[in-house]
Amino acid sequence: MSQRMTLRLTRLLNMVPYFMAHPGITKQEAAAELGVTVAQLKTDLEQLWVCGLPGYGPGDLIDLSFEEETVEVTFSAGIDRPLRLTPPEATALLVALRALGEMPGTADPTSVQGVIAKIEAAAGVATGDVVTRSAPESDQESPVVAAVRSAVRNGRALEITYFSASRDQVTRRIVDPIGVVLVDNNSYLQAWCRQAEGVRLFRYDRIDEATELDEPARPPAAALADSSSLELFQDDATLPQARLLIAADHAWVLDYHPMTDVRVREDGSIEASMRFASPDWMARLMAGFGAGVRVLGPPELSESVRSRASAALEAYGQPIVG
């Protein structure tokens, strides 16, 4: 749902109790207090007029009187009454809120904890106790996450120090934030990178430092319109590519490293291709997997991994010098 639609839905849900608390208020006064134009207020009232409880008969729909200059609610269809959550509904909502609070950058953890406390108090001690015991305590938001979230909220540029796992490099760059993306239980900053001149995703736990700059973020409009540039991993044809054979019990490797052209063999092992920028980094990574991942090509990478493994075995075979 777009931000515009979300704001309108919030306004519509608040309008019925608002007009019930202000019977006979004029459209001009209501529009000024609600922060909308009179024309938008009329559109909202017409939308409310056809909303109500399931069944949508004359006795179910919200009924309003707004033909004249004033507005009055003649039938609220129950929307004026406070929402009461059942214990299962409250538990599900609390679990979702705790999960949201544990994802860095998605929300202010202080605000999330405040909402959780209010729902627990309203839902009763029993529900709150169950959820509180089963959920770990949230850590305080780190300065890096707070800076990134603030820059996204304020629409300001960021200077970040970032570790690129695929290139085995730490770089410092200025980016123009676009938003926050959640992929496979990880939070990413979606931003226009001025250094790469393209939209990139920066994983929160790989951002070592972040400073909000005193200048507005200006991601190019063309980049925002191109959804293909917002993908988590793009197969860069300019980088060398390794063909790997992954043992069945090492299939988890695919969850941590970007792979393409994945094929499962009859014995459960997996063939996949992986791009890399640093041959030394790739050789170290492959050697660390031991027999779990075998390099099928290119030959120079296979030889580099074999040399590293041989050197490690020889080092362990030497006597320890005291």
Image: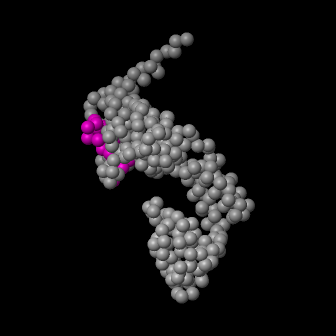
Please, is residue 64 above or below residue 232 in the view?
below
Asked if the stretch drawn in magenta spans residue 234, the answer is yes
Number of numbered discs visible in the structure rendering: 0
Residue 300 drawn at (x, y percent)? 28, 29
Occupied quadrant, residue 283: top left
Q: Position of residue 70 (x, y in %)?
A: 56, 79
- Please name whichever residue, 271 or 12, is drawn nearer the observer in this view of the structure: 12
Residue appearing at x 64%, y 56% in the figure: 116
Q: Residue at x 26, y 41 (%)?
A: 237
Q: Can residue 237 be seen in this view?
A: yes
Residue 208 in magenta? no
The colour scheme used to paint the residues is: one colour
Front one among 265 and 192? 192
Residue drawn at x 50%, y 63% is 7
Q: What stretch is highlighted in magenta?
A: 227-245
- Quarter in which the C terminus is drawn: top right
Question: Is residue 96 shown left or right of residue 154?
Answer: right
Asked if residue 53 shows in the view, the reply is no
Q: Residue furthest right?
A: 125
In the image, residue 177 lies at what x, y percent? 43, 45
Residue projecting furthest to the top: 322
Quarter residue 139 falls in: top right
175 lies left or right of 8: left
Q: Residue at x 26, y 31 (%)?
A: 299
**Rendered image quadrant of residue 297:** top left
The answer to whether residue 265 is above or below residue 316 is below
